[in-house]
């Protein structure tokens, strides 16, 4: 297996992420090497109200660049070859398979200007604006801007607590503060327009006396519908994984666990020669998160206030027991615990259709590492 990466080395920008412990079942030891903190509770805030949700299994705060290096080391230990300084240029069916062309960049310019590779299968893992996907005929994806700042933690904030603020006038999603060390944390939000999202974060920090030590950002794919992850090109096949396939939980726009589930499904499909059960399960999960997002996307401040007011002990226990990577269980048990949420959600589905971000504004972005193109 060969990995083609545009960068000249694995010197990727830092980015703090929070995931459920399901990542351990998918990645094993590689995920453990990137964990910088564990979260045992979430503190929710809206319009002067607050609620705390303890977690039966802690969430994990991981540092993305450490995870990438650990995965690269593991892949190489199993015989994979990572080739740096290769920019994807083209893809076409030829000679009973697929021919890919890569331009050499940086210090890799010696030799032919373009390197041509013939293969039977290609896995596009090059992000939400995947060049490989476009070359193979997939349409572009809708994205939303993520902006976060590394800040000093407030005095007295527990290291194992994450904070979430619902301020729908700023964003249909939420603000978060995730401790990554004993002194610093990642404070951020996802919005619709890049410039406005950055301004909202700066105003939020000013009002609460946070000072940015560094900024991080990206554009996150918005899951709007299931995308077929395989296309035939001549006698070869092209597969999409991760952000390139929009394998993102649109309820929170988190895509680490779902992205790796998609990668697992593709590997099973290639090895077994038939569709993976994991892929069907992933599709159900993503569709349920879309249902959740549609029901809450138009919530106003009063709706979030009701949500916190209605959080009884049974509802809190359900949220503690089941993670956001178990959408069906969360929906079933939470609605049993608080039936009024059903009517609230139905109202949202009927009156607030999801309008995903369409802005091409990228003012809040920083350059982020994108996983390489993989050729078995």
Image (cartoon, rainbow, N blue to C red):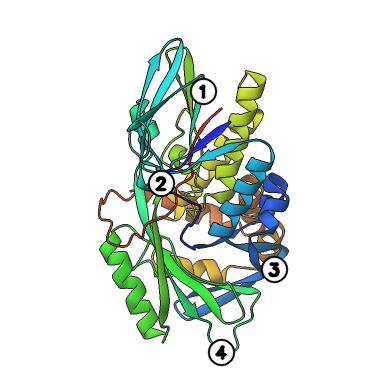
Q: Which residue is mark 1?
A: 121
Answer left or right for 163 relative to 25. Answer: left
Confirm or deny contact between disc 2 and disc 3 (CB under 8 A).
no
Q: CA distance from mark 4 to mark 1?
A: 53 Å
Q: Dot 1 surroundings within 10 Å: few (below 14), some, or many (20 or more)? A: many
Q: Nearer the viewer, mark 2 or mark 4?
A: 4
* Residue 76 seen in render: yes
Give the mark nearest the N terminus, 1 or 3. 1
Q: Nearer the viewer, mark 2 or mark 3?
A: 2
Confirm or deny contact between disc 2 and disc 1 (CB under 8 A).
no
Residue 82 x, y percent position in the rendering: 54, 40
Q: Which residue is mark 4?
A: 155
Residue 286 x, y percent position in the rendering: 53, 41
Secondary element at tag 3: helix
Q: CA distance from mark 1 to mark 3?
A: 51 Å
Q: Which residue is mark 2?
A: 222
Q: Which residue is mark 3?
A: 313
Secondary element at tag 4: loop
Q: CA distance from mark 2 to mark 4?
A: 35 Å
Confirm or deny contact between disc 1 and disc 3 (CB under 8 A).
no
Is the residue 114 above or below the residue 317 in the image? above
Q: Dot 3 surroundings within 10 Å: few (below 14), some, or many (20 or more)? A: few
């Amino acid at each position: 297996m060969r990995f083609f990466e545009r960068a000249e080395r694995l010197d990727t920008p830092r980015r703090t992420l929070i995931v459920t412990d399901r990542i351990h079942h998918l990645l094993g030891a590689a995920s453990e090497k990137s964990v910088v903190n564990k979260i045992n509770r979430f503190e929710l805030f809206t319009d002067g109200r607050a609620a705390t949700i303890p977690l039966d299994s802690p969430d994990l705060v991981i540092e993305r660049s450490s995870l990438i290096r650990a995965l690269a080391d593991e892949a190489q230990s199993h015989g994979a070859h990572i080739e740096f300084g290769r920019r994807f240029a083209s893809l076409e069916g030829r000679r009973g398979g697929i021919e890919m062309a890569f331009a050499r960049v940086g210090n890799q310019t010696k030799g032919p200007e373009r390197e041509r590779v013939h293969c039977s299968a290609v896995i596009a893992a090059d992000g939400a604006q995947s060049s490989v996907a476009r070359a193979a005929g997939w349409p572009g994806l809708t994205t939303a801007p993520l902006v976060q700042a590394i800040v000093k933690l407030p005095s007295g904030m527990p290291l194992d607590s994450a904070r979430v603020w619902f301020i729908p006038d700023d964003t249909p999603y939420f603000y978060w503060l995730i401790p990554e060390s004993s002194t610093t944390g990642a404070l951020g939000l996802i919005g619709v327009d890049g410039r406005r999202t950055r301004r909202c974060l700066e105003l939020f920090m000013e009002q609460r006396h946070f000072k940015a030590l560094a900024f991080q950002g990206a554009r996150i794919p918005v899951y709007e519908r299931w995308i077929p992850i395989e296309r035939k090109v001549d006698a070869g096949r092209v597969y999409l994984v991760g952000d390139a396939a929009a394998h993102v939980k649109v309820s929170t726009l988190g895509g680490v666990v779902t992205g790796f589930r998609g990668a697992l499904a593709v590997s099973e499909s290639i090895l077994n020669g038939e569709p993976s059960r994991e892929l069907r399960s992933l599709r159900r999960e993503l569709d349920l998160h879309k249902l959740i997002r549609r029901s809450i996307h138009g919530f106003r401040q009063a709706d979030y206030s009701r949500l916190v007011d209605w959080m009884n002990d049974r509802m809190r226990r359900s949220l503690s027991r089941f993670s956001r990577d178990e959408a069906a269980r969360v929906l079933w048990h939470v609605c049993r615990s608080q039936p009024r949420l059903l009517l609230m959600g139905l109202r949202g589905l009927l009156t607030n259709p999801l309008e995903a971000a369409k802005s091409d504004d990228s003012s809040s972005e920083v350059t982020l590492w994108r996983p390489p193109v993989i050729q078995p």
